[in-house]
Image: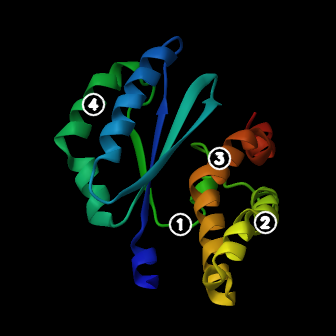
């Protein structure tokens, strides 16, 4: 299990879009996200919208179960054709970066450093605390109805699994978008 987790790879794609081209880019982005999601080993994608040097910056964070799956996506004819379609909208071309870093929720904008760990910890705490209080309450009726599921181990597995899935797929991507300016604020102020 730990070997499998260590094989997960993150592909970060940054596109700085020329002024006035947002709508065209958003339409294209929906198409490429759908195409990528159909690739073998694709685990999910988050798109972070921000600004860089006055232009819209779209940072797409794609996770794959193995490096070979990520490479197959990068080398695929579908991706090559889609990137060729959008190149005229991009200020800096197609910027890709591969990461095996586990802190994939806090991927910095191009040229910025990663947010301080204390800020990462604050956002993570704000996401996990309410879930750790609410999820056990939501499972409680099932535990009463099916006592086998209410045992120490099975209860712990169900509650933990629910929290992990909600954090990874729902709430952490939302929280990082919501707190993006605070997470990256001081770094951008120093750069100007």
**Among numbered discs 4 and 1, the one appearing first in the sequence:** 4
The residue sitting at 76% across, 48% down in the picture is 183
**Among numbered discs 2 and 4, the one appearing first in the sequence:** 4
**Front disc: 1 or 3:** 1
Q: Position of residue 20 (x, y in %)?
A: 52, 11
Residue assigned mark 3? 112
Which residue is outermost to the bottom? 152
Residue assigned mark 1? 101
Say which mark, if any, is on residue 82: 4
Q: Which residue is more in the foreground, 89 or 23?
A: 23
**Among numbered discs 1 and 3, the one appearing first in the sequence:** 1
Residue assigned mark 2? 137
- Give the vertical position of 8 relative to 180 (above or below): below
Label 4 with label 1: CB-CB less than 8 Å: no
Q: Between marks 2 and 4, how big is the CA–CA gap?
A: 46 Å
Q: Which residue is more in the foreground, 162 or 183?
A: 162
């Amino acid at each position: 299990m730990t070997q499998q987790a260590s094989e997960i790879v993150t592909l970060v794609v940054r596109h700085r879009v020329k002024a006035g081209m947002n709508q065209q880019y958003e339409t294209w982005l929906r198409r490429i996200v759908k195409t990528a999601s159909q690739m073998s080993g694709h685990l999910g994608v988050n798109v972070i919208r921000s600004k860089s040097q006055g232009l819209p910056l779209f940072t797409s964070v794609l996770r794959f179960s193995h490096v070979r799956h990520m490479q197959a996506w990068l080398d695929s004819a579908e991706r090559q054709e889609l990137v060729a379609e959008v190149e005229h909208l991009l200020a800096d071309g197609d910027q890709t970066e591969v990461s095996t870093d586990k802190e994939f929720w806090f991927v910095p904008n191009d040229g910025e450093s990663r947010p301080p760990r204390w800020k990462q910890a604050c956002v993570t705490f704000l996401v996990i605390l309410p879930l750790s209080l609410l999820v056990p309450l939501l499972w409680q009726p099932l535990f009463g109805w099916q006592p086998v599921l209410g045992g120490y181990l099975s209860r712990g597995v169900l509650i933990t699994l629910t929290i992990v899935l909600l954090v990874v797929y729902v709430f952490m991507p939302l929280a990082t978008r919501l707190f993006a300016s605070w997470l990256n604020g001081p770094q951008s102020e120093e750069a100007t």
